[in-house]
Amino acid sequence: MEKERKTYYYESYEDDLIQSKNQNYKLKEDYKWLHNNIFYNCFSYIAYVLAYVISLFYCKFILHIKIKNREVLKKYKKQGYFLYGNHTQPIGDVFTPAHICRNKRIYVVVSPSNLGVTGIGPLLPMLGALPIPSSIKKMSEFYNAIKTRIKQKKCVVIYPEAHVWPYYTKIRPFDETAFNFPISLSAPSFCMTTTYYKRKFGKKPGIIVYVDGPFNVDENLNKKEKQEKLFNQIYQCMENRSKNSTYEYVKYEKGKKI
């Protein structure tokens, strides 16, 4: 008889179901998103390579991830782009984009609370984390960091759902503002949709990630229309792909836990 599934209770789609002890962590006023120090950048490169090697084992043998349609990225090896995804794996969502993009280094937009995680938190910026500013006055520096990475022909990863919901099989509503960056920088966008299926062996489900795109900015439209069109294209694509999930490993129920 199948063991009863774990249940997550939520009141709204904005609920943060996975929280750390330092959830309210704020960036320091002198926080820097870009570093010119050669020693910092060398250590960052070495740390990234080591993390990538470790993630090969983790993604294949722990999460059992398969990636479909990755070839759509081939023509964009010499160009920076954005990659949007549904947020359903606390650790896997850090590693998976690196395997999708392979030889292109990735930078992931994250909540500042991630930097407050004991041990690994302080290392995340070296691995490519781009924490969202804690104050509005730092937004220009944050935007400049993203602009720089795109100009360097890197991949900037955005999870527009914001909060991770483990093994969730649908696409949650998200804000159109997440698409301001590709519009401002006239950069192409892609999406990756994580889906789940029941494996023949083992308790946890297997994962199939579908890559789609490119979704290019329509320069014939005004800014608001560009944003709406890009949002609709990517949201609809992810919603269609999410229907390929065939197994609910955990249950989600609206309302407070009794």
Image: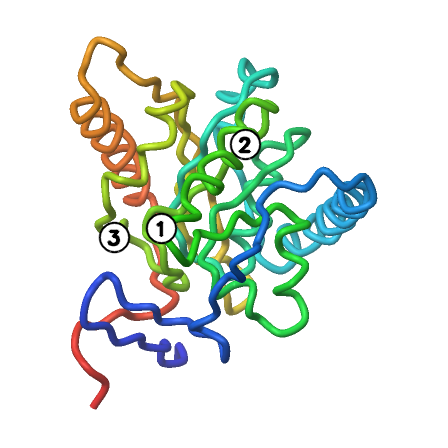
What amino acid is found at the position of numbered circle 1 in the picture? Ile
Residue that badge 1 annotates: 136
- Judged from the image, the secondary structure of the residue bearing numbered disc 1 is helix
- Tell me if 191 is positioned left or right of 43 in this view: left
For residue 155, which numbered disc appears in the image? 2
Check the image and name the residue furthest to the bottom. Answer: 258
Crowdedness near tag 2: few (<14), some (14–19) or many (≥20) residues, C-alpha within 10 Å:
many
- Judging depth in this view, the residue of 92 and 79 nearest the camera is 79
Of the residues tagged 3 and 2, which is closer to the observer? 2
Q: In which quarter of the image is the C terminus?
A: bottom left
Question: Which sits earlier in the primary sequence, circle 3 or circle 2?
Answer: 2
What amino acid is found at the position of numbered circle 2 in the picture? Cys
- Tell me if 73 is positioned left or right of 127 in this view: left
How far apart, in angstroms, are the residues tagged by discs 1 and 3? 26 Å
Confirm or deny contact between disc 3 and disc 2 (CB under 8 A): no
- Judged from the image, the secondary structure of the residue bearing numbered disc 2 is strand
Q: Where is residue 138 in the image (x, y as percent from the top left)?
A: 44, 48
**Residue drawn 40% across and 47% down?**
159
Q: Position of residue 49 (x, y in %)?
A: 76, 44
Q: In this view, does 94 lie above or below 215?
A: below
- Within the image, what quadrant is residue 212 found in? top left
Crowdedness near tag 1: few (<14), some (14–19) or many (≥20) residues, C-alpha within 10 Å:
few
Residue that badge 3 annotates: 172
- Judged from the image, the secondary structure of the residue bearing numbered disc 3 is loop
**Residue drawn 30% across and 70% down?**
251
- Tell me if 124 is positioned left or right of 130 in this view: right
Question: Which sits earlier in the primary sequence, circle 1 or circle 3?
Answer: 1
**Residue drawn 64% across and 34% down?**
105
